[in-house]
Amino acid sequence: MPPKQCPACGRFLRNAFVEGLAETPAPCPGCDEVLDATVVDGGATTQERSVRPPDLEPDLVRDRPRDVLVGWDQDADAEEIASWRADRRPFPTDAVAVVAAALVGGAGGVVSDRARPVRGAVAGMTLGVVLAAAVRRVWRLSD
């Protein structure tokens, strides 16, 4: 059985509050409308009322642009927008990926070759750089 709701504002009512309405009417805690047992229990409005917001009209949302960021950069010209999308300073993604892979590979190499940590670090860094460069190249080809 669904919980009882106020027919005026849709607020869910506590069971103790609804049981108390059998004895005496009381105001709704949400909208202060006076409720009694017949209004809460018997009305079709309480059974049909939904807490889900109404759906938007299809005509209102059908012609909206798919890009949620449309209009956020209205003061920028096309050249400035293109420069933001380019992969260059101040954040060169390829260089960051290769350096991070080198550091992770070096740390992994030191851990894996404890007898010769320098050799392990160099091998790990080399492997990390090669793998990161290959992954970034494949990533760019997929664009």
Image (cartoon, grey):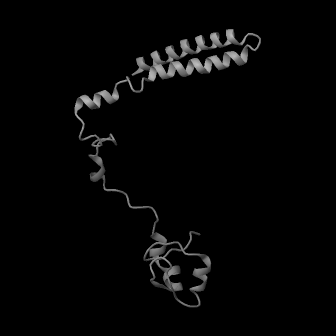
Q: Position of residue 71 (x, y in %)?
A: 27, 43
Classify the position of the N terminus by image quarter: bottom right
Classify the position of the C terminus by image quarter: top left
Residue for point 73% across, 13% down:
113
From this view, report whether residue 109 is shown above or below residue 27. Answer: above
Residue 123: name its quadrant. top right
| For residue 136, side relative to residue 62 (left or right) | right
Residue for point 63% across, 13% down:
124
From this view, report whether residue 129 is shown above or below residue 57. Answer: above
- Looking at this view, name the residue that lies furthest to the right: 115
From this view, report whether residue 112 is shown above or below residue 72. Answer: above
- Looking at this view, name the residue that lies furthest to the bottom: 24
Residue for point 48% across, 74% down:
46
Total residue callouts? 0
| For residue 124, side relative to residue 85 (left or right) | right
Residue 9: name its quadrant. bottom left
Q: Position of residue 24 (x, y in %)?
A: 56, 91
Q: Position of residue 109 (x, y in %)?
A: 67, 15
Residue for point 63% across, 17% down:
106
